[in-house]
Amino acid sequence: MRRSDVAVLCNNCGGPKPDDHYRACPDCRAEWRARARKPGGTAERIDALENAVRLALPCLRDDLHTIIESASLPDGLDGEDRMIPREGSMHAHEKRFANPIIKAIRAGEALIGRQRDNKPVWLDRIIDGTRRM
Ligand SMILES: [Zn+2]
């Protein structure tokens, strides 16, 4: 019998598992890791932090979108009839409100990555620093 004909089973649950050097399947190992977590320990704190960032980022992106849209001159509409702000038309006074939000979004996205939403591409470009406000 060839090795590939032998089903590789988890030592813990008896279910099929990848043919790797572990004796338990990935699900069993993940469950053990979760159970071994210290309450209030580093892993739980990181999860809580990422969850907070995940909740805050959409609000920050909404605020930034609104601030830029309302403080810029229009430069037409996009395919979804949303205003496209004219690049470089935002007044310095409003940039003082937008810049800390951009920094907060960048810090959050550095932690959990960019979350997909229906915001226009120009907003991502401003956050990425490839388009001026
Ligand atoms: Zn298993």
Image: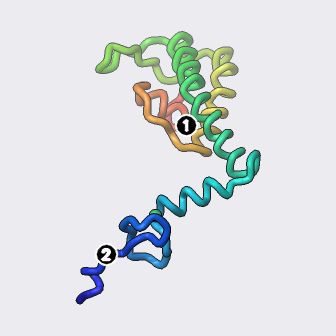
Is 58 displayed left or right of 7 in the figure?
Answer: right
Circle 1 residue: 129
Of the residues tagged 2 and 1, which is closer to the observer?
A: 2
Q: Is residue 133 visible?
A: no
Residue at x 44% of width, y 70% of height: 10
Residue picked out by circle 2: 7
Residue at 59% from the left image edge and 60% from the top image edge: 32
Give amino acid for label 1.
Gly
Examine the rendered structure and indicate whether residue 90 appears above or below residue 40: above
**Label 1 packing within 10 angstroms: few (<14), some (14-19), many (20+):** few
The percent coordinates of residue 129 (x first, y second) are 55, 37
Q: Secondary structure at mark 1?
A: loop
Q: Amino acid at mark 2?
A: Ala
Give the x, y percent position of residue 110.
60, 45
- Please provide percent x and percent y for residue 42: 73, 51
For the residues bearing labels 2 and 1, Cβ distance under 8 angstroms:
no
Q: Position of residue 85 (x, y in %)?
A: 46, 18
